[in-house]
Structures are given as structure tokens and as C-alpha cells.
Image (tube, rainbow, N blue to C red):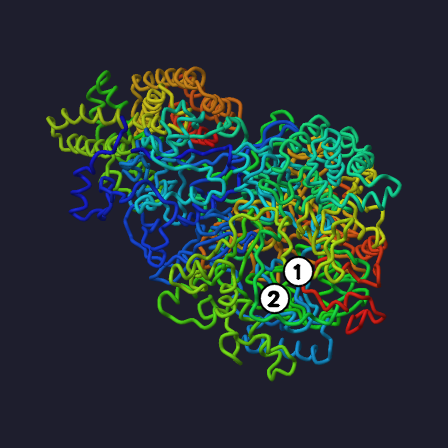
Amino acid sequence: MQYGFVIDNRKCIGCHACTTACKSEHDVPIGVNRTWVKQVEKGEFPHTRRIFSVLRCNHCSDAPCVEICPVEALFYREDGIVDFDKDRCIGCKSCMQACPYDALYIDPETRTAAKCNYCAHRIDVGLEPACVIVCPEEAIISGDLDDPDAKIAQLLAQEQVTVRKAAKGTVPNLYYIDGDEASLNPMRTEPSDSYFWNAQTRGVGHFARAAEKLAFSNSDIVDALTGLDTDKPERAPKSVEVLMQRENRIYDTPDKGILWGWEVSGYVWTKAIAAGVFLVWFIGWLMGDRGAFADLQVPVAVTGLIFLALTGVLLVLDLDQPRRFLYVLLRPQWNSWLTRGAYAITGYGGLLTLWGLAAYFEWQAIAQVTTWLTLGLALLTAIYTAFLFAQARGRDFWQSPSLALHMLVHSVMAGGATLVIMHLVSGQAIPSLLATTLILALVVNALTLTAELATTHATAEAKRTVAMIVHGRYQAAFWIGSVLIGCVLPFVLLLIGITAMPLWIASVAILIGILVTERIWVEAPQRIPLT
Amino acid sequence: MKKRNKKISWIERAAERIGIIPVNATRPDDPFEALDQEGLSKFPPIEQWDDWTEYEAKAHPRKEARRYTIVPTTCFNCESACGLTAYVEKETGTIRKFEGNPYHPGSRGRNCAKGPATINQITDPDRILYPLKRTGKRGEGKWERVSWDEALDDIAGRIAKALREERNNEVVYHVGRPGHEGYANRVLQAWGVDGHNSHTNICSSGARFGYNLWYGYDRPSPDHANAQCILLISAHLESGHYFNPHAQRIIEGKMKGAKLIVMDPRLSNTASMSDYWMPTYPGSESAVLLAMAKVILDEGLYNRQFVHDWVNWQDYLRAMHPEAPLQFETFIEKVREEYAQFTPEYARQESGVDPEMLVEVARAIGKAGERFATHTWRSASSGNLGGWAVARCLHFLNVLTGSVGTVGGTSPNSWNKFKPQFFDVPPAQKFWNELHFPNEYPLAFFEMSFLLPHFLKEGRGRMDVYFTRVFNPVWTYPDGFSWIEALSDEDKVGMHIALTPTWNETAYFADYVLPMGHSAERHDLNSYATHSGMWIAFRQPVLREAARRAGKEVTFTYEVNPGEVWEEDEFWIELSWRIDPDGSLGVREHFISPYRPGEKINIDEYYQYIFERTKGLPEAARAEGMTELQYMRKYGAFEVEKHVYQKYLEPIPEHALAEAEIDKESGEVSRDGKAIGVMLDGVARTGFPTPTRKNEFYSQTMVDWGWPEYALPTYIKSHIHPEKLDRERGEYCLVPTFRLPTLIHSRSGNAKWLTEISNRNPIWMHPHDARKIGVETGDLVRMNTDIGYFVDKVWVTQGMKPGVVACSHHLGRWRRPQDTVGNRWATNTVSIESSEDGVWNMKTLRGITPFASKDADSARIFWSDGGVHQNITHAVHPDPISGMHCWHQRVRIEKAHATDQYGDIQVDTRRSHEIYKEWLAMTRPAPGPGGLRRPLWFKRPIRPVESCYYLQDNGTGGDTDK
């Protein structure tokens, strides 16, 4: 059994009845939608047409949201519906990164993820979804795709249909009759904050809180903040562009914003340090002066634990349900790299503690064993985010085979820089191996970044992300922050010499470079519209 | 192949058991209950409506059962009155949601976006819950809560005094959307006042007049579902009478192969779905239609039988070609000569429509023949000087194809609309209110409602008691500042009572604001021509019915409504009772129960009486062991007739025929000097309600009333015809009339789910025009009308005809700083200032802001742009014949001035009065033949006694013999 939808664009008149019926059935807060009708205008007068596209969860047979959800808040039902349980959701928003269809949102009321669930509560009493029964044109058809007698199966057999983003391999169970790429493909038209009938000036969903604060502030503050900005130019496509492109998005729902913000890039950074400080210590211990490095064990463990703690704080801060942070460990969904990562971090933290204690109390045997075990988990801690990002199938730029290497190299760089700073602070001489490691890492990093930006992206979405980074809105941050400060400057300084000042600058520059790069890497792909 | 989640891990189970995390009662691996039926249903079975259990959506996947009683009612957003069912939660006694009513023959269980959004209006934190009386100056915005008794006694006393002093014409009820079948009309007749004013002249007068001239019916009812060709000069896939029901059947027809033709200068959603989009220049539609008629005539595609039998071609030949033989062939020949100039090329010149497409479309229409469904509503017929000619030329095509009243054709509206039989029919009033039907507009359809402020300004009369109901002229009408001036003047308007569920711009200028129920909080009887059948629907206060089902007796609807919200039906009974406490005014006798002699009627009895006399309903009710009222409470609707076609062919009843005279030559059947039918092939048939009982290609009425140039269907050049625009000065035609599918005038501003979809109204402009003016999307322009200007943003689109711009009237709602609540989802806060010499300025102080209320959503408002109020900058443009306000505006568009801000509005009301006089000068006033104020065969809401139709010296009617 597999429930699915057919949207018949021969009949859809773009009336938005499905939108409000859904809002009514589920009491969906304003600003966010489980189903909506995107509208695109196409063609040149008088051969203009308006394309209506009912967009919503596709109830995929291979649903990236289910795969990435760390707590099984999203799940398949036996009847094929991709359902969710708000009571399990921790508000990590990874599903919103994983879904290529922008079907999910954070409900500002419950602060948990939500989406179309095929009105599963109605299905359970034998009723069709609310959008299906309201539609004036019966343009939304529901039913069991596996039942050859069902109207939906017959329609599928008779009519030519399309799905959204078939290349994503999600196996959607929502089909369009007369689907139009101009509207179904998000890259064909530009999103805006001002459309035909609606304009957005404040955040929605996860970001609705900003508006809520306004509602309770003094009215003069509200006046000051929300007075109509007549001099503020609108971001809507300009007429020249309209003339050029002949396809123009005229209605869409409010932008949900960049959902993984500084907390996520911050945690990637702290985690890189936490793992890297051990990894670089290990390189030094293995290949350099064992005695000197053995003395560093306790400071390394303490530093690693401090940054792990920061990582944990940032992870929790990012959650819309921070009090449920333990669910990641205690309601594990093992396929999720968020769950696996949480276990890796926890395990790494535990071993690092043990390893540090062993060094402090000189428990030789334990130290021996834990060094090697800790190495394994430090490596995992450093790179698992790459696998998590890869599970975020909505973001093409993250689907990069070199992302794991990127994470590893960043971790080595961050760990190395931190160790250098630790040496400088304690007034010890910097082992040459450390500088060599950093120089090598910087070279590998340069190669990795080049590879990531130049070679490994096949899709238009990823290419546009690259363009944004290299010569778009992130170009200053990228060229100055990632390249100049993060790579060139420390590389030159490390080659120049071993005096304290350049090393200070090089180490700090490396750490800044990583922070900037991760910020760009986390943020830029989220600016690509999914619908 | 499908991946399924595996079982919940042992870690979780252990953690739950220890109590570190709460138990997640519905684990994903819980088996859900198997369905006990084959497939899914759309609606719960009606046997279970009294006690229906479903799972709480917000608790899902936890299974929390909720028990509901499902009560049918009807929607009151647009005019269609689609069926709704309210889900009243048993435990809390509150309405949770609205779905469609599958037993409603018009809407068939389906709704547009506005149906489900009805719940927003019920729970609107800004709705008015108690009667309010102004305390400061009128319009100052100061109110105090009063009791209903106080308000009722005050108003009733004032009306009683006016009636005693025979100032009957000073009592006026002005209704925007009636939504009931004749309820208030009956009340007004019971009071003996000619006090009905409506919104028709800003809506549909043009189309009504054009249709009426042809066949005595003033509205069409197309049978879209069975058509082969559908021609819309309207946007019925997104709005209009009757949006959802018509949209269903248009697409149904289209899926069966019908071709859809749409005339509209802008790409409406409807035009977008069409097979042929004809972006006609506004006002040129008649030229295009006549060119199509010419193709049909020239190529012999017309229906000879119908035209021969049912068109008054003999009258035409006699009047205009008396020398020619009285033969049908001659008629065709002469008609072809009449329209010889309407070549496709001429039509292209006027309209810009591709001549090849025109011919192709004309042939498709000819081929469709009797299966040709058409409609024009608002749009062209309400936008242009002479817009009524559009409806007339459109119906000409129906006549030529013989698609009048056929399967898949176009019937008169009245065939598909139910007429209730009331328990008491008061006598016709003996007054003619010239504020409503002035002598200058003897042919108008109907009251010249939008000229009211100008009539008052001229001192043509005053109003002592003025009710406005679901009526917001300050905002919806043209020239709103003149309304503000009139309403603010206590000498002109003695007392203004606003009956409304929610604040609006007109209610700010009332003396009393009396809260009335929303759609699910009131009674009404509905019947609309949604298709080829006939139905009635019962709007009922759902909590009252839910209470009744729960065994609680409710005497008045306000007992179950929130706060002290009444419903009009009960208000009118109560008010009428108090107007005439001792029965001496003769009012009270019309409110006596037909079931309980001498006692005041109650609302159940009112409807029971009608339902008992509804064809077929007593039988249907009896079959279920119910009374008629019980049946309607349960189903909410009843199909009176499944299909109605070709009623004009019905034979005249024997008894009528016995007393009739038959004219041997023309075949006209008449009785007491009035035509009642036509002899055709030996059968006396009722025909159409025109003087000739036929479709009148030639209108003697137009000749008799001083408009001989319009004796035939003609093309009239609009007031915004390109010849009348100075393109060099930057003048354009502005199309300001169109609706959005999500909104309905000013009634929907309190529905958050609708407002979040649509909250602004930029000016649609073709890229060529944008380049000419030098603006891009988002730039501000100053739109100069005849009486002022408004400043709005531009939206550049390929969906707009070059040389024409458009702006939806739906947005731009406002409140003033002193109006602290009121549709805050949708209203900008504005300042209004006026100078001594009548120059008004409105400025947007701030847009829409989040606000704290019992609805958490109000704090999450993400839009701030509330649009611009454009209608207030329009001058009145009364068509000298139909009386329609010709909405299209000649505008001079310029880039906004340096000091202009978004939303700025300026209007000179002295100038608007001058424009009024200019248009007034185009009229050809009554009397018509025999001293008539108005042709007797023309409809008029609440007809006064016939003697009032004859113009007397004192102008107020009264008893006369003609």
C-alpha cells in the first residue's frame, strides 16, 4: 500500500483553497504552510500564462527527512505516508536541509518541525485529506497508488506525469499532470520578498519570534521598526529582467530564512578544534619527540574537552527544543549522522577524559589503549559532519565527495593552530613538526577547497552556490577570510620563521579562516531556493 | 524495496523506563488502526453528523478522539453562499473548523479559500462583540458600550416618529451584500417605506441593463458543465457571481472538451486557463462581439429557427425599414447591413484583438450552437460608459446561436433562483424615494446608490435613520471622501446605524455600531443561479442548532453567539415590534406568527413557513419523518429542481388563455392589455417577460425613453476610449475592478489565512509602459485621477495589455490612530486631513504590525505592506442610461514626486462634485411615455404601488389615478 497524490494542472485554478483548508485542519500558524500554490508567469504578452503549482511533501519512498532525523520524529507509516511526531522532535532542522522540496517548517507554536502528513489522522478514520475534499476542481487526487482500481492509479496509467526533482532519487509519490518545469524547477525563477499580492518583512516559522517580540513592545518602537520603508528598494525582479527571462515568480510563500546559522558553523569550528588538538598531538607523538608530547597530554585533553563542551552548548543552542537535547542519544535513529555524530562526540569526550586522567595519574596501560581508541573517535568527530551534510540532500553543494577531507584538514589545521597557541602561551618552543604539519595541511586545504569549488559539482544549484562564494555575495568573506587570512597569510608566515609574533598571527589567522569558511559553507547553500 | 524504520531502540526503552525521558506513547512502530471501509470517503456519513468522532490533528500521532456535532450552514464571504459544515466540538461547545457541505447542490461539498477561512472570522480577536454608541463627535472614534434595549428603543422611537410624520422617505436601509432572499425587503414594506438602497450600481447595473433590454431578465445563468464553447467577459475561475460553483462547472465543461474564451485586458487566472485569451482594450468588447456576430451572420452559422421564432425582427423591420417586405430573409439582410462595419479588422483597431483569432472564435461559437455558455459580470459591463452594451452584444451571440435557455447554453438567472413564499406580504409602499430613483435615471438598474452623497449635498433630501449593513461605501465606493463628508453631517444623516460583525471604514462614521453574526452565527435563506438547477440553502447559526441537538432550547440566536452578537433576522423583528408598540402604525401586524395567532413571530416559524411551501421539500422531509425545518437543519440545502431549460416554451395555462386575446398577425397573446405570451405553431407559449414576449433585438423602450440611437445592440465608445486619452500627457486606462480569489471586498480583512496570502495591490504594468514612464517593479508612481491621486508601487508584468494598467481594489484597508482595533491583520494606520475647500489628504502612518491578542498568530504577522486604497480617488461616473458607475479611470501616470510616500492619497471633493454634474448632464430624464418615472416592465426592488410610477408635481408619489 502506498498513498500518494496526483495534482492535475489541467484543472487547478490557483485559488488557494487547499492552502486554507490545510491551515484549518491542522491550525497551521501564519507564515508557514504544509501546502501552498506557487505561481509563475510565463511567456510574452499576449502569449502569457500563469502556472499554478501545488507544492507540499512528496511522501517519498526514499525520504531524506526520515533518514536524517536523529530521533525518528519523522517516519514511514505502513500505508506509505511520511508522518511525523512533534513530541519526539528536537528542532534540529536537519530535515529542512534534507528535504529537496522545502516541505518542512518549524511550527512557531510547538517549536518543532512539521509538514504535510497526508492528514494521517483523517486517513485513520477513513477520510480523505482536507485539501482533497475542498478543491473546487477536484484537481488534487489522493489514493493508494498500489491499488489498480483506485482513481489515482488509473490516472497515472492514462496520463503523462512528472515529479519534482526526479534526479534526487527520493522516489516521490506526488505526481503532476501537465507539470511545468518553469514552476516546478526552483532555479528557473527568482524568489523575492515582494510578489504580486504579498510581501514579507519579518521572519516566519523558526524566525517568527522576531515578529512576536515586536507585538509586545511599545507602539513607538513598532512605528520606528516597521514604518513603511518607502526608500528601501524591493528585491523583486526588475522589469528588464522580466523582459529578458519571460518567466517570473509572482507568488510564493514567505522565505523561512537560513535555518542553520552561526550556531552550526560555530559548532563545526569548535568541534574541529576539539578533535584536531588530539589528532595533531597524535601526529607529533607518533612521529616526533614522544616525551615532549607525552607532557602535553593533560593540556590537550583539557583543551579538547573545553571545545567539546562548547560544541555541545552550540548544538543545544541550535535546537528549537533545547530541553530535548538528550533525545539525540536516548531516542536514537541509527541511520542519522546526527545521532552517530552525537555518539561519536560523546564517546570521544569520554575517552579523552579517560586518556587525560590516565596521563595525569600515569596509568600507562590505560593510556596506551585509550590513545588508539581516542584516535578513532577523534577522526570520526572531525569528519562526521561531512556525512551529515551529505544526508542533507536538499543542499546540492554539500553533496561533495571531498567534504570529509575538507573537515579532516580543517580539524588538523585548527588543532595545529591551537597547539601552537598552547605552546606560545606556556612559553615552550614550537616543535618543527607542528609547523610542518600546519604547512602541509594548508596546502591540502587549498587543494581541497579548489577541488570543492571547481570540480565536484554537477547541478545548477551547486554551481550557483559556487558562484555566490567565488564572485557573489560571499566573495569578500571567501577571498579575504578563507583564502587570504585562512591560507595565504599563515602559509607565508609559517615559511618565514619561527619567532613568536608571526606564529601567533598565523595560528589566529588559521582559526579565523576556518570559522569564516565554515560559515560560508554552511550558509551559502541554504540560500538556494528549494521551491 | 521501501525502507521502513526499524523498531525503537533498547536505549530509548531503557531511558523511558528509568524516567530520564518521557514516554513517547505513540511510537512510530505502533500499529495504527486498520480502516474498516473500502477506500476513503470525502465526508462523514450523514447518519453520524450528530455524533461524529475523529482524531485531533494537533495531537497526532497520539490518538485523541474528539467528538463533534456537524452542523450545515452557508458561507457568507462572497455572494455564492456555498455550503459549509461546522464542526462543533461537543466537549467545549466551540466551532473548530468548517468543511464543505456535500448536500449543497451549488457547491457540492467544495469551497474556495474563503470557505475554510470562515473560522478566522469567528475567532477574529478584533471582532465587535457589544453594541456601541458614539460618545464624541461623529467620526471621532469614541464609543461606549450600550445595551441592546437602549439601542433598539432609541432607533425604534426615531423610526416611529418619522413614520407618524410621514417622513417615510427618510428611513433608509442600505445593504451591501444582502445574502438573504427578501427578508429585509419584506420588513421595509411592512414599515411602508421606499427605503431600500443597494450596491447594485457599483456592481452589476451595466450587465443587468443590457440583459434586461433583450429578454426582461437581468442576469445570465450559463450551463457551463454542458457547453461546447464558453465565453467569459469575466473572471469566473477566480471571482464573481458565482465563483466556486461556476469555476467547478467551467472546468468540468472544459475537461469534456469545451473551448474557453476569455476577454480581459489583464491575464486573470481565468484568462490563463483559457483556450483563447482575447486581451481586449477596455470598452471595446462590444465591437469584438459584434464582429463575431457578423461572422456568424455572414457565414450562416446562426440558429434560424430560434431567431425566427423568438426575436422581434418584425418590429425591427416595421420601425426601421417600413418599406421593406416583412420577411425573415429581409431581416437577415438588413441586420448584415447594420453590422457591415464590424469587420475583424475594425474590431482589431478598437480592441487590439488578433482578427484571425476573432474569426476562429466566432466559428467555434457558431459550431457550438445551442451549447454556447456566456457570462459578463463586473468587468467590461461595469467599467465603461455604455458598458451595458457589452451584455447586450454578448446576449446577441446567444440569440444568434439559439443558446438561450438550452442545455449547455445560457439561461436567465431567474429560472435557477428560488422565490420564497412569505408568511405575510405587506402592501406595496406608497412612496417613491427620489434619493434612490431620481428622475434623471429612469432606466437605471437600480438605486443610484453611489450618488447619494451628491444628492444630499444638493439638498435633494435627507435621511433621518440610515442603516448600513455589510456595506462599506467609504472604502468600497468611488469618492469615499464625499461619503465621509455626508456621513459626518448630522443635518443630512440624522442617525447612522452600522450593522456589522466587524469594523469597517464606514462604521467609524456611525452613531451606533451593532454587532451582527458572521455566516455561522445567523439565519438566512439562500438561492443562487449557480447552474441549470434550482436549490435553496439554509444559513443557520450553528451553535444554536448544536445546542438544540444537545437538548438545550435556545430562544434567540444571541444566546449562543459570542458576546452580545445578534443576528439581523431577530433584530428586525424586535425593532419592528418596538416601532409599533400598540399596532397603530400598522407595522406590528406584519410580524405576527402564522402558527400562534396574535403573537410575535419567531425565527423558526419564519423559515418553517417558507420551507413548508417549497416545492418537493415537504415530501422529502416526510420521507425522513421530519418537518421541513428539521430537514433543512439537518441537510442545510435542498434541490428544488434538478434541471431547468427552455422555460419560455411552457404553454400558457388554459385558464389564463381563456381570458386572453390573440393578435392574428403578430401572434401576441395578451390579457388586460398586457402581453402574456406568443402563439407559435398553434401553441400559446409564455415566452419572455418583455413587452413583445420575445428577445428584443429592436427595443421600442429605448426609442420611447429618448435613446433611439440605441434601439439595436450597438457598440458605444467608452469614456476611456483611446480617442479620449491624451497619451502624450501620460494618460492611461486604469482597470480598478478586479477581485482576487482569496478576498472579498472589505469583508475578508479579518481572515488571517486570506490576508497572509494577499496583502498588497501594486499597479500592473506592461514592460513597454514601465519603460516609457521610467519605472521598474517596486518603484512608486503617482496615479492622477480626475479628482486627485494615489501613490502606489508598480508591478511589471507580461500579463497586462500595453497601454492599460490595472490595480485590484481589494487591498488598502485603513484605520485611523484613534481606531485602536479593527481588522488589524489588514489595515494600515493612516492620518486623514481636510482643508476648508474640500481637499482631503490621507497618509500612511504605518503599515501592518504584529499585535498581541488572544490569537498567538497576531504576534507573527510577517507582512507590513497593506496596499493602497484606490477607490477613494475615483470620481463618480454614472452611466446616463443604466446608472452603472463606470469604474475604469482615466489616469495620468507619473513617477512619484520627491515628497510622495507610498500610500499617499489626495482628493478634491469639490472637483468630484463637478464631475458628478458633468456626467449628470448626459442624462435624458423622466418622464417617459405617459408621464412615467420608469418603464413599468422594468424591475425595481420592492415595487411601490403603481401610481407612484407616474411623475407628479410634488415628486413624492402618493395616491393618484393615472
Examine the image and state in which quarter residue B232 appears: top right
Amino acid beneath label 2: Ala
**Of the pair A159 and A479, the residue shown nearer to us:** A159
**Of the pair A254 and B937, the residue shown nearer to us:** B937
**Of the pair A177 and A262, the residue shown nearer to us:** A177
Residue B288 location in percent, x, y? 74, 35
Chain holding disc 2 = B
Quadrant where the C terminus of chain B lies?
A: bottom right
Compute the Cα span from label 1 to label 2: 32 Å
The furthest residue to the right: B323
Residue position for label 2? B184
Residue position for label 1? B656
Q: In this view, does B930 lie above or below A18?
A: below
Chain holding disc 1 = B
Residue A248 location in percent, x, y? 58, 31
Instruction: Mark 1 and mark 2 in contact? Answer it, CB < 8 Å.
Output: no
Amino acid beneath label 1: Ala
